[in-house]
Image (cartoon, rainbow, N blue to C red):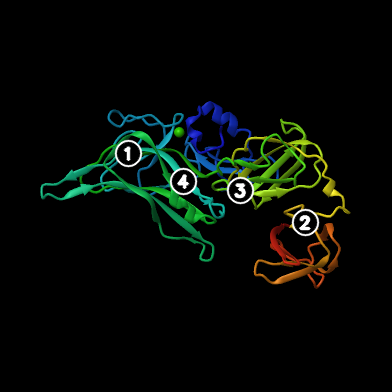
Amino acid sequence: MFKRFNVFFIPMALMFLALSTFAQDSWIEQSSPSSSQVLKLQETSQTPAETLSYWDFESGWGNWWVDNGVWEVGHPTSSSPCSLSAHSGDSCAGTNLAGLYPNYSDTRLISPAVNLPSIGVGEELRLSFWHWFSFNRFQDLWGTWHVDSGQVEMQVYNYDSLFWGSWKKIGNTYKDYSVIWSKIEIEEVSSYAGKRVRFGFHLFGDSQGNSCGWYADDVTFHCLAPEITMLLSPPNHTTGPANDTFYWHSSFRATSYRIQIAYDSLFASLSYDLSNILDTTYYITELDTTIWWRVRGENVCDYGPWSNKWAYTDVEEPNDLQNNVPGDFALQQNYPNPFNPQTRIEYSLPKEGEVKIIIYNLLGQRVKTLIDEQQTAGHKEILWDGKGDNGTEVASGIYFYRIKAGDFIQSRKMVLMK
Ligand SMILES: [Ca+2]
């Protein structure tokens, strides 16, 4: 799969074939060159997209630049022991592609500006790159050690002052040598989410000796996709009657889910295709046939793999009829959810009594009293049009609806998304 961050393990030819099919996006400077690819793999307009920016230096500098010094981009031509070829393709960045870095180096290779996306709880951003290096370590005649080193640094753009902030080190300090290409993943990048940043490879060398230097290739910003989602209920090949409520386990790094319900096992003919489900459950009315369903986790960066697909056969329940008396109180998940502008809430009353259904906002403030009256037993439903008690439309967001009928009290969450 191309999706995950092991992207560089696949053959480059396949990669470029894949790249060419993705559209460019505003995640990074519009002026970015072809070597600075931004990938956006978008299945439908409703799904979060895989987003990563990627630089392989095959088309030269792109919008990278050098502050004070010796970094170069191109084909490495150094002789042994500095004679590694590029990690990918023909080109990479290096402090001196033809030999040793000079003494007194204090040189920074700086990336184009990148607007990192905001992330939610559980979501993570990463900066990864491949590098190799050989830095001088030298003890002089007076016993003093001179240790050259490299570190990656990040800088944040301040929209108020219109200046870039100070450089802050991220990841480790690299010293001595690591003379094969190895991959680095820097996790601290998550704390820069939502900011406009650029980063640099900063090499410090003093007056005492030098070495091959620092080489970098295949630099990428990426997000981590949610893990695969495991289905829970109803079990595979179950036949109703049952509530058509689908349950799954929460998947790591997912902040919402997408469920697909299809009339065929290939999911060619979709009955439902719903995103932005915040719970790990979904209630659907009146399928009345055999369906297949599957779920995947999503987050702002990416989506996880689809779960296994499970078959479920729904048969019409006699309880579906309005005049049958249900055995228990119940408050169903509203449908659709998320919704705009209206949604339907179903509930069941096994006996006659006083019923209240009230909608609250996240602060627990009452938004709308939907029902406050005596009702007969039966299966009921009520629509909410997204308006408060004062008749005005409420804002997008999470709301709770709560039923109180006799001793039965239950709340559920719903999302109004305009
Ligand atoms: Ca390369």
Judging by the rendered image, the residue that carries numbered circle 1 is 133
State yes or no: Cβ of the residue under disc 2 lies below 8 Å from any atom of ligand 1: no
Which of pointers 4 and 1 lies earlier in the amino acid sequence? 4
Label 3 and label 2: CA atoms lie apart by 28 Å
Which dot marks residue 127? 4
Disc 4 and disc 2 in contact, CB within 8 angstroms: no
Q: Which quadrant contains ligand 1?
A: top left
Q: Is residue 359 left or right of residue 153?
A: right
| Residue 318 drawn at (x, y percent) | 84, 46
Which of pointers 4 and 2 lies earlier in the amino acid sequence? 4
Q: Label 4: few (<14), some or many (≥20) within 10 Å?
A: many
Q: Is residue 362 left or right of residue 375?
A: left
State yes or no: Cβ of the residue under disc 1 lies below 8 Å from any atom of ligand 1: no
Judging by the rendered image, the residue that carries numbered circle 2 is 340
Judging by the rendered image, the residue that carries numbered circle 3 is 26
Q: Nearer the viewer, mark 3 or mark 2?
A: 2
**SS label for mark 4:** strand
**SS label for mark 1:** strand
Which of pointers 2 and 1 lies earlier in the amino acid sequence? 1
Label 3 and label 4: CA atoms lie apart by 18 Å
Which of pointers 1 and 3 lies earlier in the amino acid sequence? 3
| In the depicted structure, whether residue 349 falls above or below residue 284 | below
Q: Nearer the viewer, mark 3 or mark 4?
A: 4
Q: Residue at x 89, y 54 (%)?
A: 323
Farthest residue, direction left: 141
